[in-house]
Image (cartoon, grey):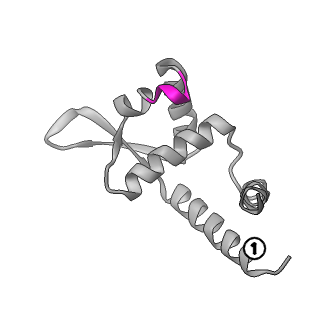
């Protein structure tokens, strides 16, 4: 339960991007795949049925791109697949969350 309290407090800090729970879940899925060197395509992202319908997921991807948390790219040899990757802003955000969680854990309660 302490972890949930810490995570909630870190994500509610004023400098954290305002994301709804569904945007956050999608961004986390995409970022984790990127971290594992398995970059997710738009097709794979809109296929995450546990997170919503394809149309809803497409709208969330668009909102995350507008918030500069995701960017897309195509492989030079295959222009059909569009890949989703976290931006530097997203990577910094998750890094900042991690640092704050570590310092909160190190601080006795």
Up the image or down, 56 lies above or below 28; here it is: above
Is 51 one of the magenta-colored residues?
yes
The residue where tag 1 is placed is 104
Would residue 26 appear left or right of 101 to someone viewing this image? left
Up the image or down, 76 lies above or below 101; here it is: above
What x and y, as percent, mark residue 9? 79, 58
State which quarter of the image contains the N terminus.
bottom right
- Residue at the image point whose x is 21% and y is 34% from the top: 79
| Viewer-nearest residue: 87 or 96 | 96
Residue span colored magenta:
48-52
| Viewer-nearest residue: 2 or 19 | 2
State which quarter of the image contains the C terminus.
bottom right
Q: Which residue is outermost to the right?
A: 109
- Residue at the image point whose x is 52% and y is 28% from the top: 50
Would residue 70 appear left or right of 10 to someone viewing this image? left
Q: How many labels sit on residues? A: 1
- Residue at the image point whose x is 36% and y is 42% from the top: 40
Is 47 one of the magenta-colored residues?
no
Q: Specify the principal SS of the magenta part.
A: helix
Up the image or down, 57 lies above or below 76; here it is: above
What x and y, as percent, mark residue 88? 49, 59
What x and y, as percent, mark residue 61? 51, 34
Q: Which residue is outermost to the left?
A: 77
- Residue at the image point whose x is 51% and y is 60% from the top: 91
């Amino acid at each position: 339960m302490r972890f949930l309290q810490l995570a909630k407090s870190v994500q509610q800090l004023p400098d954290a991007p305002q994301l709804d729970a569904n945007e956050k879940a999608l961004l986390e899925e995409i970022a984790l795949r990127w971290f594992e060197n398995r970059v997710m395509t738009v097709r794979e992202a809109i296929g995450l049925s546990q997170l919503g319908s394809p149309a809803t997921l497409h709208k969330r991807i668009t909102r995350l791109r507008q918030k500069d948390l995701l960017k897309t790219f195509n492989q030079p040899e295959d222009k059909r697949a569009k890949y989703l990757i976290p931006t530097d802003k997203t990577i910094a955000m998750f890094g900042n969350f991690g640092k704050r969680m570590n310092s909160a854990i190190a601080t006795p309660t």
